[in-house]
Amino acid sequence: MTPQISSLLVANRGEIAVRIFRTARDLGLATVAVHSDPDADALHVRAADAAVRLPGAAPADTYLRGDLVIKAALAAGADAVHPGYGFLSENADFARQVQDSGLIWIGPPPEAIEAMASKTRAKELVRAAGVPLLDPVDPATATPADLPLLLKAAAGGGGRGMRVVRDLDVLKEALHAASAEAASAFGDGEVFAEPYIERGRHVEVQILADAHGTVWALGTRDCSLQRRHQKVIEEAPAPGLPDTLRDSLHAAAVAAARAVSYRGAGTVEFLVTTDGRPYFLEMNTRLQVEHPVTEAVFDLDLVALQLRVAEGAALPLSPPEPTGHAVEARLYAEDPAQDWRPQTGVLHTLDIPGQVRVDTGFTDGDTVGIHYDAMLAKVVAHAPTRAEAVRTLAHALAGARIHGLTTNRELLVGSLRHREFTTAQIDTGFYDRHLAALTETAPDAGTAALAAALAEAAPTPDAPLAARLGGWRNVRSQPQTRRYTSAGTEYEVQYHPVDHPGIRVLAAERHLVTLEVDGIRRMFHVKRNSNNTEVYVDSPLGAHTLTPVPRFPDPQDRTEPGSLLAPMPGTVVRVADGLAPGSHVTAGQPLLWLEAMKMEHRILAPASGTLTALHAATGQQVEFGALLAVVQEEPQP
C-alpha cells in the first residue's frame, strides 16, 4: 500500500525548517516543529501548527537526540519526518529508527546513507562505479612532494575537521586538531589526507531519484567562494564549464547514486582543477543549503518532490529544461574582518528589498544565540543571464537594512561586484587572495554620524523644534543651542557641531535625513534600538552602526593590560599543551580554542611575555567578555 503523508515533523530548526513548512502548507499537510529551550519562540516554532519541546540547549541534548525527536513525532500525531540538513539528516541509525517506529522517512534509504557516510568508504564505492578520484595520501609516509595536503573528517562536512597542511613540521599537530574537532562535531575522529588542489573549483550536481529506477541530474552548481571550507556564495549553473565536462559530471553523479540504490534528493560534489579535470569529493545524502538556486533554474520545489518520492510517486523520465541563472548568498551574523567571528544578540531589523527570494529563520526582534549556526538568511536572485542575477543580488544586499548585529553583508556585496566574480574567474582561493581588501574599513562614518545627530535633533510630535535647522559652522567657542518644549516644559540642549565641507542639510526627520554630499543628494535612514545604545544609519554610501560615547566612562570597564577576553559566548574546547601561569608565550601563539556557533576560534597571545593568569579550562562555558587569561608583556630591549 502506498504511504500517504498527512502530518509532517521537521527534525530541524531555523530557516530550513521554515522553508520545509512553507511547502508542507502548500501541499495541505499539518506541520510539527521541535525546539530546544533557546528556540522556544523561534520563527520555525511560530510557523508550525504544533511544536514539541526538546529539553535543554546544546544540540547534543536536543536536536541530535533522535529518540526524543521520534517520541515527539508520535506524540504530535505526525506520520512523516523530514530531517532538513545538518543534525540527524545523514544519520543512518536515526533513519532506521524513524522507519521502525512506523513513520515515513523523507530521505534516502538508511543503507545509502550508511554507504556514503564515511568519505573513505564512499570513495571505494564510486571508484568501482568509474567516478574519478584523488588518490589518498598516508600522513605517516607523506613527503614534501605530497604537499600541500588537505586533512578531512571522514564522518562529516561543513568545514569541520578540515585543515590545509603546507609544512610537514605541523602535520602531526594538524592531524590532532582535525581529529579532535571531527570527534566533537560528528562523534568520529577519523581523518584522512588527500592532495590539496590550489585554485580548484567546487562544483556539484544535484540529483533526485525515485524508487522506480529514475535518477535525475539537475544541473551543476558552483560553490567555490568559501570561508573556512564553508560555502558563502553559490550559483547554478556552474559558469564556464565545457559541455563535455558538464556531461561527464552529470554521468558521474548518476553513477554514484545508482551505486548505492539512491532515492530522494542528494548532491554529488566534485573538485575541478584549473585544467578541467574533475575529482569526486563526497556525496551528501540530504537536501543542500544551496538547493534554492537549482529550484529557481529548473522551476521545481525539491521539498515537494522529496515528499512525493517518499510516498512512492514516480518521477517523469526526464527533468524539465533549465532556464536562466540563479545566485545565492549566505548572510551570516559574523565579522569577516575579525577571523569570521560569530555575533550574538538581538536582530532589530532584517529587511532585504528587491525581487529576490529570502529564506530565513529570523524576524525583527529575534535573538541570535550561541548554540547554532550563524547564518541569518539565504538571499537568492534568478534572472535570464548570470550578469543580471549577480547585479540583482548585489543591489538587494546593498540596499538591505540589517540592524543589531555585525554581518558579512558588505563582504557579500564586494564579492559579487569583484571583477574576478563578475567574469566567473572563481576558485576556492578567492578569499585567501581578496579578504583583506574586501574587509577594509567601511566608508567614512562622519557623514553617517552627522545624519544621526541631525535625526536626534529633529522634531517629534511631542517636542516640536523651536526653530528650523540653521547652517552648520565650526565655531567651537559658541555651541549651537536648540530648545524644545514638551508638556509645557522647555528643554535646552547645547552641543558643538562638526564642520563637514561639501555637505548641505536639505531635510531632517527622526528617521530620515536628506543631505547634499559633494553636490549629490543622498537619503540617510536612521533608526535607534529600543534602549538607545546604538544608532543605525543606512544610505547609498554604506551602512553604519554608531554607538554613543558616554561622557564619563565606567571605571569598571577598564581591564588589566594584556587581558584576554572572550570575544563571544562559547565553550573552551582546548587549552594549549602545558599552558599554565608562569609559562612564557610569544606574540600570536594560540593559547586557547573557543567553540561558538559551530565554529572554532583561536585565542592568541597579544604579545610575547609571561602568562600571569589562566582562568579558562577545557569544557568551560564562558560569557562574552569573560577574562580568560592575562599575559604580562616582556620589556622591550
Image (spheres, rainbow, N blue to C red):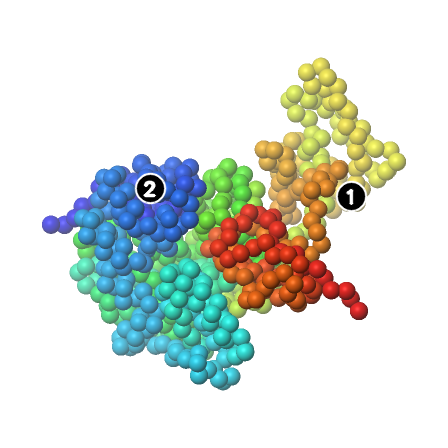
Q: Residue at x 27, y 55 (%)?
A: 94
Q: Position of residue 342 (x, y in %)?
A: 53, 52
Q: Is residue 635 left or right of residue 92?
A: right
Residue 58: x %, y % from top left? 42, 49
Q: Nearer the viewer, residue 179 or 486?
A: 179
Name the residue that disc number 1 marks. 500
In front of the other: 206 or 496: 496
Left or right of 319, for residue 143:
right
Q: Nearer the viewer, mark 2 or mark 1?
A: 2
Asked if residue 302 can be seen in this view, the reply is yes
- How far across and down, in percent of the image, does residue 325 sit? 42, 58
Q: Note whether residue 523 is visible.
A: no
Return the residue found at the far right. 477
Instruction: Indicate the amino acid at tag 2.
Output: Ala
State whether residue 237 is above or below residue 138. Answer: above
Contact (CB < 8 A) between labels 2 and 1?
no
Residue 164 image point, x, y percent: 50, 71
The residue sitting at 63% across, 61% down in the picture is 581
Q: Which residue is mark 2?
A: 33
Q: Which residue: 42% across, 60% down?
A: 184
Looking at the rendered structure, the secondary structure element under dot 2 is strand
Which numbered disc covers residue 18?
Answer: none
Q: Which residue sits at x=38%, y=37%?
A: 46
Which element is circle 1 on?
Answer: loop
- The image shows residue 412, relative to residue 125, as above or below, that is above
Which image quadrant: the C terminus? Answer: bottom right
Instruction: Determine the CA span between mark 2 and mark 1.
Output: 53 Å
Q: Find residue 440 and report its image quarter.
A: bottom right
Extreme-left residue of the structure: 1
